[in-house]
Amino acid sequence: MIDKEINPLIVGGMNMKKNILLLFFLIIATDVSQAQLATDSWAFGFGLTYPRFVSVNIQPLNSNYGGFLSLKRNFSEHVGLRLNASYSHLEGEYLDVTLTQVKSFTNVIAGNLDLLYYLFPCKPISPYLFASAGSGLRMLKNNATASLGTNEIVLAFSLGGGVEWAIDSDWKILAEYGYHITTNSELDGAIGAGEINGRDTYFSINLGLLYYFKKGEPSKDCQLYSGKSQ
């Protein structure tokens, strides 16, 4: 009878100790990531992309995929530039002249220059905003407008935001959303009036890793933020 009453207390105490230890390690990890932030840095990124048409003249489908590589230069705790190369495979459907449902494919190999602004750079989970301009090679298959060239260069402007989540002093997890606006109506392979101001748009969700391979001096602002002396 005594054992039945004591055992739940023992188990509860052990669980509480585990939670306290986990919290302790999270605090240590957070403190390290804040102290390690540099005034300037270089980082290499890579990961997977999920793109999807938003405003186009065909019916967007969900069977899309892609990937990205990036090289980033942070000039301060708040401001950075990023060269981003990506591949996106987007799918859609339309009705041809015989009212048959046809699946079309758009593949894009793109390059962008992004301007990034970090809202709270000293946090272990650091949100940021970005704006970018770039171009890409657009490749079509089964496109609705037959007069369009299969392989063409497209221009696009992008806005978005994301977070970088520090997992140690050199590595971070990247999660990002981008909204992309092209300069014409040709990305989906169907010219028409269904887009916003006659321009195709699509979004992308990126998930990947960042490796900071070069860093400048430790940030004094973040040392102050974390309560450390200079």
Image: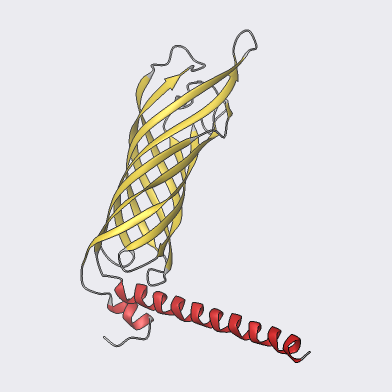
Where is 26 relative to 130, above or below? below
Please state, as top left, top right, bottom left or bottom right, where the C terminus lies in the image.
Answer: bottom left
Residue 128 appearing in the image: yes
Q: Indicate the colouring scheme.
A: secondary structure
The residue at the far top in this view is: 98
Q: Where does residue 27 sit, x and y in percent of width and height?
A: 44, 79
Residue at image position (25%, 74%) is 218
Q: Where does residue 227 sit, x and y in percent of width and height?
A: 37, 86
Where is 198 relative to 48, above or below? above
The answer to whether 5 appears left or right of 139 in the picture is: right
The answer to whether 189 appears left or right of 115 in the picture is: right
Q: Where does residue 110 sit, x and y in percent of width and height?
A: 34, 36
The answer to whether 108 appears left or right of 214 in the picture is: right
- Which image quadrant is residue 34 in? bottom left
- Which image quadrant is residue 119 in? bottom left
* Foreground of the two, 171 or 176: 171
Where is 76 relative to 91, above or below? below
Residue 199 appearing in the image: no
Please state, as top left, top right, bottom left or bottom right, where the N terminus lies in the image.
Answer: bottom right
- Which image quadrant is residue 61 in? top right
Residue at image position (48%, 24%) is 105
The residue at the far right in this view is: 1
Q: Where does residue 112 sit, x and y in percent of width and height?
A: 33, 42
